Image (cartoon, rainbow, N blue to C red):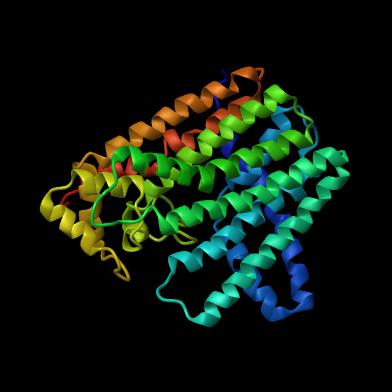
Amino acid sequence: NCFMNSTFYFNFMRQTTYATEKLIVREIKKLEKIDRPLFELVSANIYGRVNTKRPKLRPGLTRLGYEICGGKNWRKIIPICAAVEILNVSTYTINKIFDEKGGKWSKDRINNNIIAGIIQKEVASDLLNEAYNLINYEGFIKIKSLFDEINKITYFGQFKDLNFLRIKNKLPSFKKFIDDYKQRCYFFGGRYYENSLLIGGILAKGNKKQLSALQKFGELFGTSLQMVNDIGDFVPPDKKPYKEAFKYYQDQYGDLRLGKLTLPIYLMLQNASGIEKKFILKQVGKKQTSLKDGYKLTKILITTGAFKECKKLTKGYVNQTKRELKIFKKSIKKDLLSAMTSNVKSSVYWKILKKFNKIDGV
């Protein structure tokens, strides 16, 4: 295995993101000529994400799926990378309603957000149609089916999240919880990353073995990354890892306030003392979390061993994920895909939380 220089990896991801977002901005600006207020509504979250200037994983996965299966000239699939990214923004737009980001929402705000999310999804679908000129009809139908499936499965995950994985008086058994939780993380992340890779692989006419490996890699990587994001909810806002962190869609301690039962929350409630458990449960339903309370919650995450257990589970996923790449010949593209798993194994969240227990006054 070649040593993957982190600068090379980030340059690759930035190059893909820059080309993808350039096209996204151009496409979304077409709405401005049709209806200015509508353009402002639909473009708000898209520009919000573009302005973070962070490399975006999903377009990178689609490109790598394409190139690792032998695809040449990745720039011709930029519209497909853009479709995958805009679809992602549409799910964030709708998700904001479910999570009531910024407090209780008015009916008009909810209605407008639904409209924005639906139009974003349609803009993404229009861009995906450009795949018709890149592959035969059978291949195009497969790609379209994978793309549509992302949306459907994401909302399967939302349904589970909103209705079943909730904080109640009695915790379910760990087996029952972890089965539901893994499925929810797969619906939110695993299937999206799996299908993003497969779309690229099919565009390059990848063989069955290659596509099967990409499918499993995406499933494991995306599922474990969703778990890491749930841990990231417990990083205090004043310890953010980089300037743009948390601004776009993350709402620190928001899962707990909304009464969601994620892995870190389950383990904290299971392992906490009586006093700590009361404190944790008192946060449910609050409009916001003070920095002092946030620090206390993060301390409980660490002292109860919840942090350690979460890290151990995701590490197991990473080891499985890398094994799926064995069927591919040694190449830079293979190393780039392998390097992506550092988003799970060496997440900046782990580093911040590991140091957190040593901070004075905590």
Residue at horizontal 63%, vertical 70%? 116
Q: Is residue 120 left or right of residue 126?
A: left
Residue at horizontal 48%, vertical 25%? 320
Q: Quadrant of residue 214?
A: top right
* Residue 282 visible in this rendered orientation of the protein: yes
Q: Is residue 13 left or right of residue 260?
A: right
* Residue 50 visible in this rendered orientation of the protein: no
Residue at horizontal 23%, vertical 57%? 169
Residue at horizontal 71%, vertical 52%? 83
Depicted 38 relative to depicted 81: above or below: below
Q: Residue 340's x, y, as percent? A: 54, 35
Q: Residue 217's x, y, as percent? A: 57, 31
Question: Which residue is at the front of the view, 35 or 9?
Answer: 35
Q: Is residue 151 left or right of residue 290?
A: right
Q: Quadrant of residue 168?
A: bottom left
Q: Residue 30's x, y, as percent? A: 78, 69
Q: Quadrant of the N terminus?
A: top right
Count of numbered marks: 0
Question: Which residue is at the front of the view, 44 or 358?
Answer: 44
Question: Which residue is at the front of the view, 189 or 153?
Answer: 153
Q: Is residue 210 left or right of residue 110?
A: right
Q: Residue 47's x, y, as percent? A: 61, 64
